Amino acid sequence: DVKVTQSSRYLVKRTGEKVFLECVQDMDHENMFWYRQDPGLGLRLIYFSYDVKMKEKGDIPEGYSVSREKKERFSLILESASTNQTSMYLCASRYPSGRFSYNEQFFGPGTRLTVL
Amino acid sequence: DQQVKQNSPSLSVQEGRISILNCDYTNSMFDYFLWYKKYPAEGPTFLISISSIKDKNEDGRFTVFLNKSAKHLSLHIVPSQPGDSAVYFCAAIITGTASKLTFGTGTRLQVTL
């Protein structure tokens, strides 16, 4: 069964703290993604990685960085958390996309991060 | 620039009736479209998809229609059930190895008894 897990379901941090969000997939997928979901804004892509040690900026990368040292693990780092980074963070993975297949992304359960 | 738009933030439908969720896109290079369903405090789950070479795809109670000339797709749920109450996101992609999904802002569907 397809599985994407995220290290925490709920997290509370203080402004200025360094925050690590971990994501692990067991499907041998090459592509991995980090999104945040905010009311009225939908899912916005922060960063993605199409292979180990590869990373690409998404639509809203400011204030975030990522790490992909192993194929199954993709970490999102908030170098200095701010209150406007309070959000639901979602990780996803996928095989490389194709014309008629492999476009489906599998999502983890999400991490609700609150920055005080 | 919102390339994928869901103009209805919410929709309420009676149980047993048809739910129609709409999605518009602006980028004519998109060649594959997906619908995801999301319950509160859970990650989105894939529902149904359609390639740009088709105009309809059906899976049980769910049917997606694609009108390429209008750059419009819709998701039909027939009959609607209370368990269908969730937020629905449409997404589009230009297929390729390193391509990414572009999501709409979501429509909250409530199916009432």
Image (spheres, grey):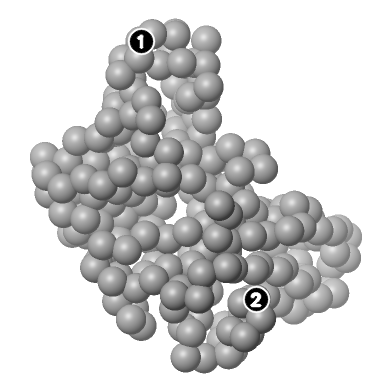
Q: Is residue B70 left or right of residue B30?
A: right
CA distance for labels 1 and 2:
43 Å
Query: Which residue corresponds to the image point at 78% horizontal and 71% vertical from the top-left?
Result: B19
Q: Is residue A51 left or right of residue A86?
A: left
The answer to whether one can see residue B34 in this image is no
In the picture, the quarter occupied by the C terminus of chain B is bottom right
The answer to whether one can see residue A49 in this image is yes
Q: Is residue A64 left or right of residue A60?
A: left
Q: Is residue A8 left or right of residue A79?
A: right
Q: Nearer the viewer, residue A53 or B63?
A: A53
How far across and down, in percent of the image, does residue A23 sit? Answer: 29, 40
Residue beneath disc 2? B72
In the figure, A112 relative to A97: above or below?
above
How far across and down, in percent of the image, does residue A37 sit? Answer: 53, 41
Corner quadrant of residue A73: top left
In the figure, B70 relative to B109: above or below?
below
**Residue type indicated by callout 2:** His
How far across and down, in percent of the image, does residue A60 sit? Answer: 43, 38
Query: Which residue corresponds to the image point at 77% horizontal and 77% vertical from the top-left?
Result: B79
Query: Which residue corresponds to the image point at 76% horizontal and 58% vertical from the top-left?
Result: B8
Q: For the image shown, how many numbered marks are present on the structure?
A: 2
Instruction: Give the label on residue A17, or none.
Output: 1
Q: Secondary structure at mark 2?
A: strand
- Chain letter of disc 2? B
Q: Secondary structure at mark 1?
A: loop
* Label 1 with label 2: CB-CB less than 8 Å: no
Do marks 1 and 2 share a subunit? no
Corner quadrant of residue B25: bottom right
Q: How would you rate the neighbour count of disc 1 (Cα within 10 Å): few for under 14, some for 14-19, many for 20 or more?
A: few
Instruction: Give the label on residue B23, or none.
Output: none
How far across and down, in percent of the image, does residue B93 sit? Answer: 42, 68
